[in-house]
Amino acid sequence: MIAVDWGTSSFRAFRVDRSGAILGRTSSRLGILNVARGEFAGTLRSAIAAWLAEGETDILLSGMVGSRQGWVEAPYLPCPAGPAEIAAALVPVPFEGARARLVPGLTDRDGDGVPEAMRGEETQLLGAMDAMRGAGVACLPGSHSKWARLAGGRIASFRTYLSGEAYSALRGGTILGRMMTDGPPDAAAFADGVARSGQAGHLLHHLFGVRTRGLFGTLADDASASYLSGLLIGHEVRAALPADGHVSLIGSATLTALYASAIAHCGGTPRVMDEDAAARGLALVADAG
Amino acid sequence: MIAVDWGTSSFRAFRVDRSGAILGRTSSRLGILNVARGEFAGTLRSAIAAWLAEGETDILLSGMVGSRQGWVEAPYLPCPAGPAEIAAALVPVPFEGARARLVPGLTDRDGDGVPEAMRGEETQLLGAMDAMRGAGVACLPGSHSKWARLAGGRIASFRTYLSGEAYSALRGGTILGRMMTDGPPDAAAFADGVARSGQAGHLLHHLFGVRTRGLFGTLADDASASYLSGLLIGHEVRAALPADGHVSLIGSATLTALYASAIAHCGGTPRVMDEDAAARGLALVADAG
C-alpha cells in the first residue's frame, strides 16, 4: 500500500507492506498550502507514479490534506478512537486506478468543554501504539504540540499546547527577538530556560525576564533564543507531564531531542520513538479497514 | 516647571506648578525612535519654546529618553525608591538657558534574582502616590505591564508581564490572528477570555483553544481578538492580584477600563487613576530635589 503524510507545508509518501515495513519513500515541499484547489489528485499521481506503475492500488492519506483547506474535508472523529474506529471512518477521494482514502482527524474536549483537534498526529500515534503496548502518554512536539494518552490500544484523550507557534511569534514580533542574534543551539541556555519555567511567577512575567537578563548582561544575545525555547518548552512540559513521568516522544530528531532534555530536567523519563510512525500508523489502519 | 514624558513612540510635555497642577500641555509623535542622535535638545526646544520664552528654567524628563537609545543614559536606581532617592539621582543633560535633568528608571529583582526594569512608570507611580496615601498595589497596563507595590511613600518592588506585546505578536504572527477579523471591542468575548484564564490548564493550552473554538463555531471571527485579549489579561491579573484585591490603575482610558473589568471579574477591586500622573510625579520630584 501507499501511505501519504500530507501536511500544511510538506508532502511525504511511503510504500509499505502490510506489517508497516517501509519499502520506499519520497517527499517534497508540496504541502497543501502549495497545491491549488483541484490539483490534489494530479500532484499525488506525479509523486507516486512509479509505485502505481508497479501495481499499488491502495492509498491512505493523513494530515491537513483532510482539512477544510485540503482535498476533501474528513470530519473529526471523537476520542477515544483506535485503528478500528478510524478505519471505519475513512473518507474516499476520487482517484482513477486506485482506492484513495483520507484518515479523519480526531477531536476531544478538555475538562472545561473547550474543543481539541488534531490532524495527522492520530496516525503517528497509531504507529507508536505497538511500541507503547497500547497505553501511556505520548508527546508530539511542534507548532501545536500534542500530548495524548493512549489506553487499551486507542487514543483516549489529548491536549494541545501552542508553544512552537508562540516561540516563533514572540521571537519574530517582540523586543525579545530584536536583541537575539543567530547562533548555534545553546544547550546550557536552553537548560537555563527550562529551570526558569519551574520558578515562581507566570510565563508572562518570565518572558519579560528574557529581556531584562539581556539588558543586565546575564544572558548573551546569541544564547537568548535557546533560553526562550527552553522557557516555553519547560512551561509546556511542567503543565503536561503525567504523574509517572513516562513520555514517548514522536517527531523530528531535533525537536524530540529538545523535549527529551526538558522532560528529563523536569524529572520525567523520555523515550524517543522513530520518525516513521506515520507510515506504520497508516499500515495499521489499512490492516484494520 | 516643565515636565516631559518622552517615550519610545510619543512625546508629551506639561507646564506644571509646584503643586503638580497642569497649566499647559503639548504632545507629538516624536518618540525617541523618531529622533536622530544629537537632535534631542533641538526637538525639545522646539516643542516647549513658548514656555521657555515665558521664563521657565526647570525641565525634568522621564521615560525612554533616559535609556541607552535615548538622549543620555540615566542608570537604573534600585528599589525601594521614593521622591527623595529619585531626586538625588537625576542626571543633567546639556540644554542652554534652562536646567534639564533626566529621571532615572528603577530596577528590582524578583524572588529568584531575575532583574526587573522600568523607565517612565516610576514617575507615573510617584504621581499616584498621594492618592494612594503612599501604599498599596498599582498596575500600569501596556506592552510591558507593571505591577508595583508602594509602601511608606516609596516604590517598594515591582513585577513586569509581557502581556501587551505577547498579544500583538500572537495576533500578528500565529494562526490565531489569521482567523481574526476586525470588529468593535466585544465585552462579552473579553469576559469569556478572562473566565477561561481561571480554568484548568496552562496559558499555552488555552491559546490553542482560541483556534479550536473558532474552528468549531463557538467563537466568532470578529470576537476572537477580544477573547484573546481577555485570556492574556486574565492570566496576568490572576498571577499579579494582591491578596486584598485592591489595585490602582494608571494609564490610558482604554487599557485601564479593560484591566478594571478583568480585575473585577477576578474578584478584585480596581480604582482607575487619572491620566496625568506623570506630570504630577515630575512636579513631586522637582519639589523633592
Image (cartoon, coloured by chain):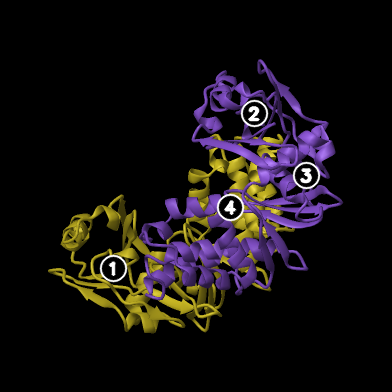
Chain colours: A yellow, B purple
Residue beneath disc 4: A258
The quadrant the C terminus of chain A occupies is bottom left
Residue beneath disc 1: A68
Q: Label 1 amino acid?
A: Arg
Residue beneath disc 3: B108
Categorize mark 2 by other alpha carbons within 10 Å: few (<14), some (14-19), many (20+). Answer: few
- Looking at the rendered image, the disc whose residue lies closer to the viewer, 4 or 3, is 3
The chain letter under disc 2 is: B
Q: Secondary structure at mark 4?
A: helix
Categorize mark 1 by other alpha carbons within 10 Å: few (<14), some (14-19), many (20+). Answer: few
Residue beneath disc 2: B68
Q: Secondary structure at mark 2?
A: loop
Kindly indicate whether the residues beneath marks 4 and 3 are on one polypeptide chain.
no
Q: Secondary structure at mark 3?
A: strand
Q: Is residue A62 above or below residue B96?
A: below
Cα distance in 3D space between marks 2 and 3: 18 Å
Cα distance in 3D space between marks 4 and 3: 32 Å
The chain letter under disc 1 is: A
What's the residue at 31%, 81% (across, down)? A89
